[in-house]
Image (spheres, rainbow, N blue to C red):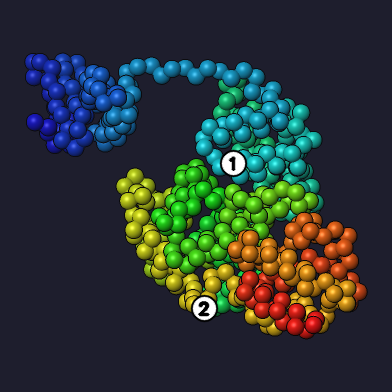
Amino acid sequence: MPDILTQKTVEAAKYEGRTRFVRDANVKGLILAINKTSKTWKVQADLWRDRRLVKTVRHTLGSTDDLSLRRAREHAQEVLRQIRAGVDPNEPEPEAEPTPGVGSMTVGELWDAYETWMREQGRAEVTIEGFRRHLDKYLDDWRDDPISDLRKSMCRERHERLTKNHGKYPANQVMRSLRAAYNFAIKLDDDDVLRANPVGGVHFHPERQREAIILPEDLPDWWRRSGELPNPLRTAMHRLGLLSGLRPGTLVGIEREWIDLDGRAITIPRMKSGRSFALPLSEPMVGLVEEALRIGDALYRDPPWLFPTRTNDGREVIATRVWKEKTMRGETGHILRHTYRTMAERLGVPQSRARALLDHKQPGIEAHYVHSSALRDELLADQERMSAYILETAKADRSKTPIARQPSRGDVPPEDGLVMSELDPVWERHAREIASRVAELLRERSAVVQEYLSPEEAARLLGMPIRTLENYRVRDAGGPPFHRISSRLIRYRVSELHEWMEARRVECE
């Protein structure tokens, strides 16, 4: 039976004619072995591998002269953890194969090696791309230099130059990347050629938190202005970003095959953390996703993304890459994630579930015992509460479409409105024919088209030469080309466009 050991009982224990073993009641597996000449601490435990008992391991920690009871218990717990992990503490550790010539690596070779290691560790691709960009854009002239030649003065001078030419934040970020890569090289340097990290000589600029939040009292104005963006697909994107708290890089890259509206979730296979993540969808979020799908179907042919766009030359459909807006500077992107987390705190969502909704790692022991997959119903209920609270705070009209207010005929804001009386006579003569073709297009796509068409796209869809389209301008010199006029017509639903066509027919007759 285990004994309750104290330091005094350990010191008082005597040899009684034969070796005896006293088991500690505090740490199961710790044994005090008392023989004729010495008293030693030992650990005994079963070693299991692949659910099979390999053997019973007994490992000597040291004598009572070297280890007190407290230190023996601490050491024993470390050894027991090894044994539970399937490691025999009595077996010699395999020697790591030396990596030859680490000190002779060039900066470019170090970057390649560190990138490979990051991929093996499951780092997000966006992180690796940013790391690569720091070399290609800011350190390219060092690419062929041996890393052992780098000096503190060189890093300090480069940091100062980057600060002057690109700003404080990029300068700090580039030096952090170099510091991380160099630390990686030091760990591989068996010959100890590399000295202390040269980035240690850089005076980093203090950084304040750049991402604030959108205050609750400012949410109504934010919601209104997001609905006034000329592209409703971007309206849906930003509003979904606010209601989901997704990182902007993840939001813009959502693929349609990840979406399960019946299951009320978007399953993202790989987040920044390297894990997959099932984003619960509240009813308002489902509405935004459905609207984005309809608009995408109307504008593009079988787009694989939820928020597609075109390349600058208009030839290729790609996932949206930009989440900034000229009319909403600093109010889109990661700030919406900060806002979501703050609103969750105000609403009183439990900390562990708020973290789960944002795919944040649970701290401490919760990381091992709290499984988000088992909290699906609870997380979905929290998401519904969050959406309702945000929409209520933003004073959003839940009875209307979740994307944007559809203007009624004649209710076009004067600052961007293009009413029929402002169109030049050339366009007026062709108005009925063009409207008919636009209506036919809308019937085929069965959705509201609300994005400006490129001249090439308008020419193809309407069957007109692009030169002819480019000649259709509003009366004022320098007015927008025809495709912006047609986009105003396309803002209306098919039925409303038919009403407009009928009115134009009567007027023309």
Question: Residue shown at 71%/27% (left/top)?
Answer: 106
Residue 118 appears left or right of 230 = left
Expressed as whole percent of the image width and height from the top left, the position of residue 461 reads: 74, 58
Residue 350 appears left or right of 316 = left
Q: Which element type, helix, strand or loop, lies under badge 1? A: helix
Residue 25 drawn above or below residue 414 = above
Q: Which element type, helix, strand or loop, lies under badge 2? A: loop
Mark 1–mark 2 Cα distance, whole angstroms, equals 39 Å
Question: Residue shown at 29%/29% (left/top)?
Answer: 84
Q: Residues within 10 Å of mark 2 (few under 14, many from 20)?
A: few
Expressed as whole percent of the image width and height from the top left, the position of residue 239 reads: 56, 66
* Residue in the foreground of this view, choosing between 239 and 274: 239
Circle count: 2
Point out the image quarter for the C terminus.
bottom right
* Residue in the foreground of this view, choosing between 396 and 428: 428
Question: Residue shown at 68%/64% (left/top)?
Answer: 440
Q: Is residue 173 visible?
A: yes
Looking at the rendered structure, which numbered label has been put on residue 105?
none
Point out the image quarter for the N terminus.
top left
Q: Quadrant of residue 384?
A: bottom left
Q: Is residue 355 visible?
A: no
Question: Who comes first in sequence, dot 1 or dot 2?
Answer: 1
Residue reaching furthest to the right = 477
Residue 93 drawn above or below residue 203 = above
Q: Residue under circle 1? A: 125
Q: Residues within 10 Å of mark 1 (few under 14, many from 20)?
A: some
Q: Quadrant of residue 496?
A: bottom right
Expressed as whole percent of the image width and height from the top left, the position of residue 497 reads: 67, 74
Q: Amino acid at mark 2?
A: Asp
Q: Residue under circle 2? A: 397
Q: Quadrant of residue 251?
A: bottom right
Q: Amino acid at mark 1?
A: Glu
